[in-house]
Image (tube, helix red, strand yellow):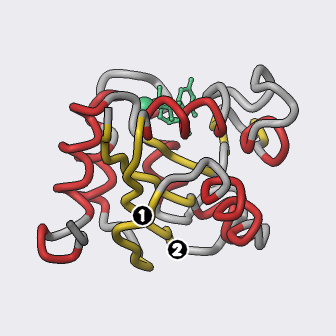
Amino acid sequence: MKERTLILIKPDAISKRLTGIIIDRIERLGLDMKAAKVIAATEELARKHYSNLEGTPFLENVIAFMLGNFNGIEDHRIYAFVYEGENAVEKIRAEIGSTNPENALPYTIRGSFGALKNGVMQNCVHASASPLEAEREIALWFKPEEVLK
Ligand code: UDP
Ligand code: MG
């Protein structure tokens, strides 16, 4: 089924200059980029995005990480994308790998480039976990008119 998904390149990957290689891997899945932007997340946006982590002990560190204030990353940018295509959600989740980079298969994005530091999984990329989550997240990061049909 044709679906949309939200992808974020996180501050760790941006500071490591991995943007090109990550986009290359995503493009090779045969999906189509429908929206793109450079953004410095506000705390409000980061908290809404990670509302599923409420009540977990690592939430505050994850928010700091997404705002670019963690482990000396000092890069406040996030690159946000909407990609569309057949089974887009599943295809991209398989390509990025498991949440914990230490468990991710070595050839996945997180397995290749992620790091676990001070309890935060600095795992380079976010991708929506389900089509429903994707639509909620796309609406958080993009105005409808910013996404091509
Ligand atoms: N995270 C973490 N420690 C954990 C779980 C999550 O640092 O034990 C961070 C990690 O950056 C992850 C994000 O919080 O990507 C969101 O967690 P989620 O369980 O939604 O994983 P994802 O969907 O990103 O694989
Ligand atoms: Mg998630």
Q: Nearer the viewer, residue 4 or 128?
A: 4
> Looking at the image, which residue is at 24% across and 71% down?
148
> Alpha carbon of mark 1 to alpha carbon of mark 2: how far?
17 Å
Which residue is disc 2 drawn over?
76
Q: Is mark 1 within 8 Å of ligand 1?
A: no
Residue 43: name its quadrant.
Answer: bottom left
Residue 121: name its quadrant.
Answer: top right
Which residue is disc 1 drawn over?
81
> Looking at the image, which residue is at 55% across and 33% down?
93
Q: Amino acid at mark 2?
A: His
Query: Which residue appears farthest toward the left when viewing the image?
Result: 144
* Comes first in the chain, label 1 or label 2: 2
- Disc number placed over residue 45 in the picture, else none: none
What is the x, y in percent for residue 129? 40, 30
Q: Amino acid at mark 1?
A: Phe
Q: Nearer the viewer, mark 1 or mark 2?
A: 1
Left-right relation of 51 to 72 = left
Q: Nearer the viewer, residue 98 or 28?
A: 28
| The N terminus lies in quadrant | top left
**Is mark 1 in CB contact (under 8 Å) with mark 2?**
no
What is the x, y in percent for residue 75? 61, 74
Please tell me whether residue 40 is drawn above or below residue 69 in the rendered image: below
